Amino acid sequence: MEKKVLLLAILKKEADESFKDVLMMLENARVMSLKEGKKLLKELKKEKLIEESGLTPKGVAEAKRVEEEFKL
């Protein structure tokens, strides 16, 4: 579940925000710890859903699917 939230947060992040900014926002909202967020970022990179600059096309498609899932 937290991986889905992180993926969606990355999709919704502003252009001037970094992954660390997103992780800090989620930590402040008590969604996940910074340590857990960093672990999940590594998993998303391994799954080729994100790259250094942001979401990959595969990542965008997955994030939009997650967004639809949360709307239900």
Image (tube, rainbow, N blue to C red):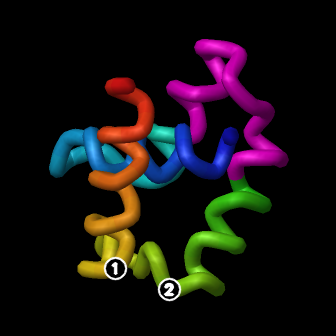
57 relative position to 49: left or right: left
Q: Amino acid at mark 1?
A: Lys
12 relative position to 32: left or right: left
Q: Badge 1 is on which residue?
A: 58
Q: Amino acid at mark 2?
A: Lys
Q: Position of residue 26 (x, y in %)?
A: 58, 28
- The quarter of the picture where the N terminus appears is top right
In front of the other: 19 or 56: 56
The residue positioned 70% from the left and 72% from the top of the image is: 43
Magenta-drawn stretch, dominant element (helix, strand or loop): helix
- Answer with the quarter of the image where residue 2 lies: top right
**Label 2 secondary element:** loop
Q: Position of residue 24 (x, y in %)?
A: 58, 32
The residue positioned 28% from the left and 66% from the top of the image is: 60
Q: Is residue 22 magenta?
A: no
The residue positioned 72% from the left and 56% from the top of the image is: 38
Crowd around label 2: few <14 · some 14–19 · many ≥20 (10 Å): some
Q: How many marks?
A: 2
Q: Badge 2 is on which residue?
A: 48
Q: Position of residue 16 (x, y in %)?
A: 20, 47
Look at the numbered discs 2 and 1 and tell me whether their residues touch, using CB distance below 8 Å. yes
- Answer with the quarter of the image where residue 63 lies: bottom left
**Label 1 secondary element:** helix
Magenta segment: 23-37
**Residue farthest toward the top in the current orientation of the protein:** 29
